[in-house]
Amino acid sequence: MARWLPRSADLTRFCQKLNRVKTLEDDMMETSFNRCLSTIDLTLLGIGGMVGSGLYVLTGTVAKEIAGPAVIVSFIIAGFASLLAALCYAEFGARVPKTGSAYMFTYVSVGEIWAFLIGWNVLLEYMIGGAAVARAWSGYLDSIFNHKIKNFTETHVGTWQVPFLARYPDFLAAAILLVATAFISFGAKVSSWLNHVFSAISMGVILFILIMGFVLAQPKNWSAQEGGFAPYGLSGIMAGTATCFYAFVGFDVIAASSEEARNPQRAVPRAIAFSLGLATGAYILVSVVLTLMVPWHTLDPDSALADAFYRRGYAWAGFLVAAGSICAMNTVLLSNLFSLPRIVYAMAEDGLFFQVFSRVHPRTQVPVVGIVVFGLLMALLALVFDLEALVQFLSIGTLLAYTFVAASIIVLRFQQQKVDAPAPAAGGRPSPEPREGPSAGELKEYESFSDKLQLVDRDKSKEHREPGQLKAAFEPYLEFLSDFYPGEVVTVAVVTLMVSAICLCSILVFGSTHLHLPTWSYSLLLVLFSLGFLLSLLLISAHEQQRGTQTFQIPLVPLSPALSIILNIYLMLKLSYMTWLRFAVWLLLGLLVYFGYGIWHSKENLREPRPQRVSARYVVFPSGSLEERVQAVQPSSQPTAGLPDTDTEDCKR
């Protein structure tokens, strides 16, 4: 029985496989894609991904059913949470200008299995998001023509009464997805140009809504007679925040497009900042206008803005708003279809997904196989499935990706920077710094004992401390941490920080409602988990981090990513249990794909160093310091009689 149990060495190697990180190329600007996108192109892509159906539908839904006019506060909080995540994406996108977005960022810093699961969830997010927007696009156009398309389909095709399927097949939604797929397959420049056209029309309509809306505004709609500004209280505002967060999920299209940017080090951070700022301002101002034009409790959740103008007697304005909403939805469709195949390409290029999706068309320089296959899958989802119950996947998958990207920023910032070759030391000898990269598994050679002594004392040097090492000011108080490898304590502290954040948010969300904890127990647990969170944060701050990089860096690390982590976890726990159940099922399917295919075909398997024969001799000093014994054991420059030359160059300690 015991011989069937895995050995500890096998388990260790298996865990190392799961947590291996991606090795980046020497020249990260080299790519098979076409680097043709400017800062303006990326900014408009980000705006197109964020300012879509959410502006025309989500604002009215949250205002009427969740938060009231305080939806404005919900958008402000959601915008702040998105800003923290966006800054993390901006730093990664500038430092690692490769396609793949959150998947790639997690792979280069945290580990393989976590990266695969993030990428797996982002795939579902984009597929459901694109199909949902296509159905919303179809419904909005149908409402303009008095639902003639719906009535014709139900009469001539029929209706279904099957769980998880739509009431009737939406051929219009499927058709618009197929047309968008065709345009995306022509290349990044064509997609960008088309996005420019729709974004310009959409922003013009938004500007019209704001001007006309403030003219028609009535402050009495926020008065106590109409229910007040925050009729659902703080809980309604926070629940609205969790829903409003969905409005800002589109900015990661910029990070996914970084491999097609001309100058990603500058363009990606600027585009993310500009697009998120404009989108947040648009959502807040439109929410103000909408709740001031008509009483919040009379809004139509399906077409709030257009209906508000109709009810104020401006039917032509309502028609214009409906046309603008269709253009905005087109930009979201293009954003989803643009990003998804590129993330699939990144996973396939690394060997974690099927290799057929890593093919890039030689003329258009886009992953045409991924575009066509996933465009067809989106069209199928929009055609037959009822997407209402699945849309909440968008929030949980996005929040999980944001959480891992924030944690990856902390881990990456406190890691030692990898170099491809050692710099020459004085006298022409190789540097005692161990090499990293493709030859990391080779045996390092040293020519003299002084080199070995420099290697031994390198970590103790106080003049220059590398990232991940304890700061000199904290060494007298935390001396027991000095013996760990650089970055090792930080990694453990990040895990502890995330566990503390999960426990703290669980108590905040469920402590008084579902768990019915007494006041003393509730307060004690809050204090304990808050201390765990803060102590982990302080322990991370006590270590050196990378400085002086030429690319954008998020300020206040590790505080900013830690705030992003706790906000994202809090919003995730506000989602329904059915969302978590469906999410768990999707994760299990992802694990089957990874262990059935990805772990065996990963390209990192080829880069793993093979075990090599290493011989070493030791000289043990019973007392005294190593420095005092150097001259006594320093080998002479002449070979010792009877011994080969190589033996005199071996390390003696």
Image (cartoon, rainbow, N blue to C red):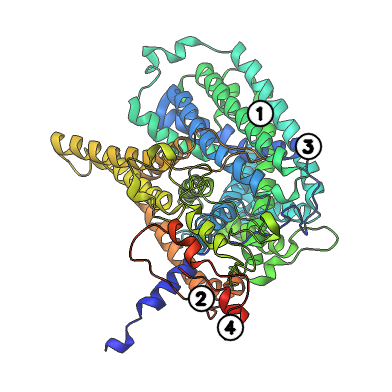
Compared to residue 465, the image places residue 590 above or below, namely below
**Residue under pointer 4:** 641
Amino acid type at circle 2 is: Gly
Measured Cα–Cα span from mark 4 to mark 1: 94 Å
Residue drawn 32% across the image and 40% down it: 477
Nearer to the camera, 466 or 448: 448
Would residue 265 be found to the left or right of residue 613 on screen?
Answer: right
Q: Nearer the viewer, mark 4 or mark 3?
A: 4
Q: Quadrant of residue 25?
A: bottom right
- Of mark 3 and mark 1, the one earlier in the sequence is 3
Compared to residue 488, the image places residue 221 above or below, namely above
Q: Position of residue 479 (x, y in %)?
A: 34, 46
Q: Which element type, helix, strand or loop, lies under badge 3?
A: helix
Residue 297 visible in this rendered orientation of the protein? no
Measured Cα–Cα span from mark 3 to mark 1: 17 Å
Q: Residues within 10 Å of mark 3 (few under 14, many from 20)?
A: few
**Residue under pointer 2:** 596
**Residue under pointer 1:** 321
**Residue under pointer 3:** 197
Q: Position of residue 256 (x, y in %)?
A: 65, 49
